[in-house]
Amino acid sequence: MIDVPNGTPLSLGVLISGRGSNLQAILNNIKNGSLSASVSVVISNRKDAIGLKHAEEHGVACVFVDRKSFNSKSDYEKVVVSTLKKHSVQLVVLAGYMLLVGPVLLGEYENRVVNIHPSLLPSFPGLDAQKQALEYGVKFSGCTVHFVDEGMDTGPIILQAAVPVLDDDTEESLSSRVLKEEHKLYPAAIQILAEGVTFKGRRVVRP
Ligand code: GRF
């Protein structure tokens, strides 16, 4: 699916909007050798995204693309795509990217856009996933790395991790328990993609 010549690190383009702790985890795992990839470019739709600072500290190319300066999502995404291409990106990694991905990006990177979501999908897609989990009363929640399709957190699942929901949990305490798992799960899922996966219907399996 992703054609990676033997021994070549998978070239990642990471899209962020804010804190960038998952980006940081990916960069750390590349540095310690547990993830065979390189972050070729970080693109943010927010100029003040803290994640841009982490990326700059790691010497990664950073680009701010302002959605507001384009009349349409497709014009905005054309610039995002040309930036990804310029940096020879093979896999697009959404890491706290707060915009819905549209057909221009998905068309250019079919089955090569992934996202991490802080719930066990298909439960609690969209915003405030941890709040939704607490309100529903589930006893386990977690995080999901999945391929991105045109829906809201609906694409095929690559990896999941579960955490317990405790009686005294608040949105903050549950979010921080989930986030710790995210930081392990996302690099692990990208490594699996670097090694190759295939589809059995919606199931993402290793060949
Ligand atoms: C994470 O909780 C992720 O699951 C969600 O947005 C948050 C991003 O956090 N998609 P960070 O910017 O990676 O710290």
Image: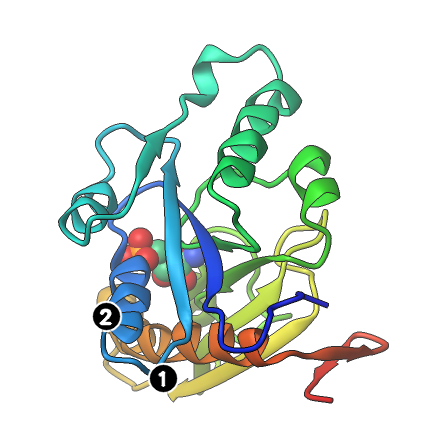
**Residue at image mark 1:** 165
What amino acid type should be assigned to the residue bearing mark 1? Answer: Val
77 is higher (above) or lower (below) than 5: above
Please rate how many residues cluster around mark 2, counting C-alpha atoms within 10 Å: few if below 14, some from 14 to 19, many from 20: some
Q: Residue at x 58, y 10 (%)?
A: 71
Q: How many marks?
A: 2
Could you tell whether 41 is left or right of 56 in the image? right
Q: Nearer the viewer, residue 161 or 89?
A: 89
The reply to whether residue 69 is in sight is yes
In which quadrant will I find the C terminus? bottom right
Q: Do residues under tags 1 and 2 come within 8 Å of each other at their CB atoms?
A: no
The image position of residue 19, as x and y in percent, is: 24, 49
Is 66 left or right of 190, judged from the image as shown?
left
**Above/below status of 83 relative to 156:** above
Say the numbered circle drawn on residue 28: 2
What residue is drawn where x is 54% and y is 74%? 194
Amino acid type for the residue under numbered disc 2: Asn
Q: Earlier in the sequence, mark 1 or mark 2?
A: 2
Comparing 150 with 120, the one in front is 150
Where, quadrant-wise, is the N terminus in this rendering?
A: bottom right
- Residue 193 in which image quadrant: bottom right
SS type, badge 1: loop
Residue 195 locus on image (x, y percent): 58, 81
| Residue 90: % across, % down | 57, 55
Mark-to-mark CA distance, 1 and 2: 28 Å
Q: Which residue sits at x=56%, y=39%?
A: 85
Coloring basis for residues? rainbow
Residue 151 as seen in the image, left or right of residue 86: right
Q: Is residue 63 above or below residue 9?
A: above
- Nearer the observer: mark 1 or 2; the answer is 2
Q: State which quadrant residue 169 falls in.
A: bottom left
